[in-house]
Amino acid sequence: MEEFFTNISRYPRYLISFSLGILLTFLSPLLPLFKRPTTAIAAVSLLVAAFLCLSFILRAMLGLEAVPL
């Protein structure tokens, strides 16, 4: 039974390392864009716009807020 709990305690560490690996994989191609100010502004604007778009879509899909037509 102790072996079972030892095995279960490894899952949170696996989840954290897996999530960080995916995050680094997605962000590594974007890092060179932040070396110049013009591309950094464009990249940050694009990321903010993508986040806002995703949040608006999810709010509308889940019915959390009335969407004006």
Image: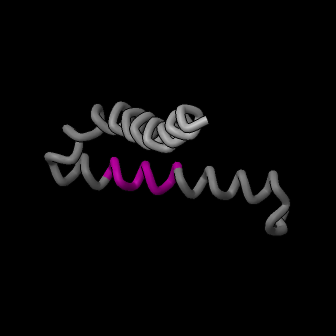
As drawn, is 59 to the left or to the right of 54? right
Question: Residue 46 location, x and y as percent?
Answer: 43, 49
Q: Nearer the viewer, residue 62 or 43?
A: 62
Residue located at (18% from left, 54% from top): 37
Residue 66 magenta-highlighted:
no
| Residue 24, image quadrant | top left
Residue located at (43% from left, 50% from top): 47
| Residue 16, image quadrant | top left
Q: Residue furthest left?
A: 35
Residue located at (14% from left, 46% from top): 35
Question: Residue 69 location, x and y as percent?
Answer: 85, 62
As drawn, is 20 to the left or to the right of 30? right
Q: Nearer the viewer, residue 53 or 10?
A: 10
Residue located at (79% from left, 57% from top): 60
Residue 47 magenta-highlighted:
yes
Q: Is residue 45 above or below residue 6?
A: below
As drawn, is 42 to the left or to the right of 51? left
Question: Residue 39 location, x and y as percent?
Answer: 25, 46
Secondary structure mainly formed by the magenta segment: helix
As drawn, is 29 to the left or to the right of 7? left
Looking at the rendering, the stretch of residues picked out in magenta corresponds to 42-50
